[in-house]
Image (cartoon, helix red, strand yellow):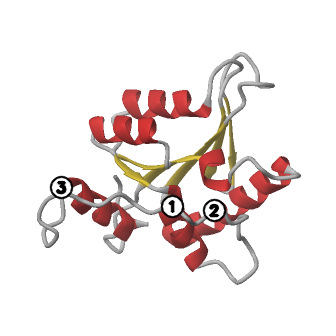
Amino acid sequence: MASTPEGETIANIIIDGYNVIGIQHRDGEAERERFVEALIGYRKRTGHDITVVFDGWRGGSARPSRTTSGGVTVMYSAHGQTADALIKKIISEDDKHWIVISSDRDIQGRAWARGSVPVESEQFLRKLQAGVPAGEYAPIEEDEDYDAPARKGNPRRPSKKQKALDRALKKL
């Protein structure tokens, strides 16, 4: 990770796009554009290197596509490949320490195994929306009836994974 002149650490963030915004939208293209615009504003505020990956496996080309918009790298997976597979490939082959934004357990497991830190999509959305003017970006709310499973161990002492997650969240 690089540093700014002020000494702040710049994070390398990779985002599972549809995992964050969902796929149940009338106009998926407009929702993607709104999300990328929100990420551009977030990048301007934080300076983080941001890559967002969307599924392109149904109608995509034979190779993954990559564009840059406002300093945010936007990728679509290749035809026959999911965004999840592309994200796992990127974090496995790249020596960067990533902050991986996804609630997908398989991606989170790969991130931990490669020395990166996964952050739940909901947690990232809260950070993203914290600096955005009201009404500018707010994804459609999902069902909030999920209860997290009880933790095992000493409740006063955070696990190593929780400590790493806390450090990553401070950077976001």
What residue sits 62% from the left and 28% below the top?
A: 82
What residue sits 69% from the left and 82% below the top?
A: 133
Q: Is residue 5 above or below residue 68?
A: below
On-image quarter of the C terminus: bottom left
How far across and how far down the image is residue 60, in percent? 77, 25
Tell which tag, 3 or 2, sits nearer the viewer. 2
Q: Residues within 10 Å of mark 3 (few under 14, many from 20)?
A: few
**In the shown orientation, is residue 32 left or right of residue 21?**
right
**In the shown orientation, is residue 27 left or right of residue 4?**
right
Residue 59 visible here: yes
Report the residue marked by disc 3.
Answer: 160
Q: Indicate the amino acid at tag 2.
A: Asp
Report the residue marked by disc 2.
Answer: 143
What residue sits 73% from the left and 64% below the top?
A: 140
Q: Indicate the amino acid at tag 3.
A: Lys
Discs 1, 2 touching: Cβ within 8 Å = yes
How far across and how far down the image is residue 47, in percent? 50, 64
What residue sits 35% from the left and 74% below the top?
A: 6
* CA gap, disc 1 and disc 2: 8 Å
Discs 1, 3 touching: Cβ within 8 Å = no
Report the residue marked by disc 1.
Answer: 146
Q: Indicate the amino acid at tag 1.
A: Tyr
Give whichever of discs 3 and 2 has the lower sequence position: 2
Q: Residues within 10 Å of mark 1 (few under 14, many from 20)?
A: few
